[in-house]
Amino acid sequence: MTHANAELLTLARDISLRAGALIKQRRAEGVEVAQTKSAPEDIVTHADQESEALIRSLLAEARPNDGFFGEESDATSGSSGLTWVVDPIDGTVNYLYGIPAYAVSIAVVEGEPDPNTWSALAAAVYNPAADELFTAAAGAGAFLGERRLQVAAAVQLPLALVGTGFSYNSARRRKQAAVVQGLIEQVRDIRRIGAASLDLCGVAAGRLDAYYEKGLKPWDHAAGALVAQEAGARVQGLNGAAASNALTIAAEPGLFEQLAPVLDGLNVLDA
Ligand code: IPD
Ligand code: CA
Ligand code: CA
C-alpha cells in the first residue's frame, strides 16, 4: 500500500469509528424520524444529519483540500483531486427499527466524483451494532478487523445465496419484485439485509455469494464496492459497465458470469 493510501485508510477508519459510536449512542437514546425525502418510506433521522456533520468537520480539519460528497448535505469540490464519498448511516430503516444492520460508509476516490469514472483509493464500512469494521485500500486487500477477507469459493448459481435491495419508489419496487420473482427459483435463496454497504461487505466476507441492486446512490456503494473488489469479487454492471445507479452486481467472478446474463434476461436494467 502506498504511504498516501495508508494515511487515507487510517483517516477513513478512525472517522467511521467515531461516527459509528455517535450513531450507536443516539440509537440507545431513542430515534425519531426528522423528515422524509423522496417518499414517506425514505426517512432521515437527526442521527443521519449529526453523523454526516461530524464526518464532514473531521475531514475538513484533516484534509481541507479534498472534496466532499455525502448523502445528507451539499457536495463541495476540492483542489486535491480526491473526494470523500459518505453515507452517514446506511440502512436507516434498520436503524429506526433497531435491527443491528446499519453502517457508516466512507470512501475516498480519485477523479470526478462519478462512479462511472472514479477510482476508489480507500474505504471503511463500520457497523457499530455488531462492532464490525470492514476496510480496504486499492491493491492492498480487504479486512474485517484484522482478518483478511476473501470472497466465497466459486459456487454454481443454483447454490448461490443472493442479496438484493429495493428502491423507496413504489413503481420501481414492483419491477424489482418481478426480477426477484424470476430469480428466486434459480438460486439457493434471496436476502434483503437493508444496507447496501453491508451487502457488499457481506460478499467480501463470504456471507453472501452475490449481491445486486439497481438504483444505488454513489454513497451506497463507494466503500463497499472497494471492500468486495479487494476481497476478490467482481463488482460491475452489465457488459463491463462500472457499478453505478444503473446496476451494481458483486460476486466471485465465475458466479458473476452466471448471474449477470440471468439478471439481463429478467430485464433488470428496466426495473
Ligand atoms: C439504502 C440501503 C438499502 C438499499 C437502498 C439504499 P439508506 O440506503 O442501502 O439497503 O436497498 O437502495 O438507499 O437510505 O438506508 O442510506
Ligand atoms: Ca444508503
Ligand atoms: Ca443513508
Image: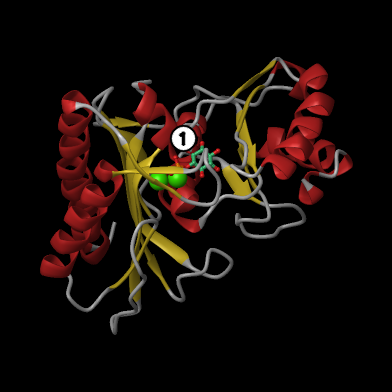
From the viewer's side, name the closer residue of 55 and 229: 55
> Which quadrant does the N terminus fall into?
bottom left
Q: Is residue 91 visible?
A: no
| Outermost residue, right side | 265
Up the image or down, 71 lies above or below 267; here it is below
From the viewer's side, name the closer residue of 220 and 140: 220
Whole-percent x, y for residue 242 in the image = 62, 59
Q: Quadrant of residue 264?
A: top right
Tell me if 233 is positioned left or right of 247 in this view: left
Q: Quadrant of residue 165?
A: top right
From the viewer's side, name the closer residue of 42 and 158: 42
Question: Callout 1, which amino acid?
Answer: Ala
Q: Residue at x 26, y 74 (%)?
A: 66
Q: Quadrant of residue 161?
A: top right
> Which quadrant does the C terminus fall into?
top right
The number of callouts visible is 1
Q: Residue at x 39, y 56 (%)?
A: 71
Whole-percent x, y for residue 259 in the image = 75, 35
Q: Is residue 73 visible?
A: yes
Up the image or down, 206 lies above or below 220; here it is above
From the viewer's side, name the closer residue of 206 and 140: 206
Q: Residue at x 80, y 25 (%)?
A: 181
Whole-percent x, y for residue 226 in the image = 44, 49
Q: Residue at x 21, y 57 (%)?
A: 53
Display colour scheme: secondary structure
| Outermost residue, left side | 61
Tell me if 107 is positioned left or right of 235 in this view: left
> What element does badge 1 sit on?
loop
Whole-percent x, y for residue 154 in the image = 65, 26
Q: Is mark 1 within 8 Å of ligand 1?
A: yes
Up the image or down, 258 lies above or below 56; here it is above
Residue where numbered disc 1 is placed: 195
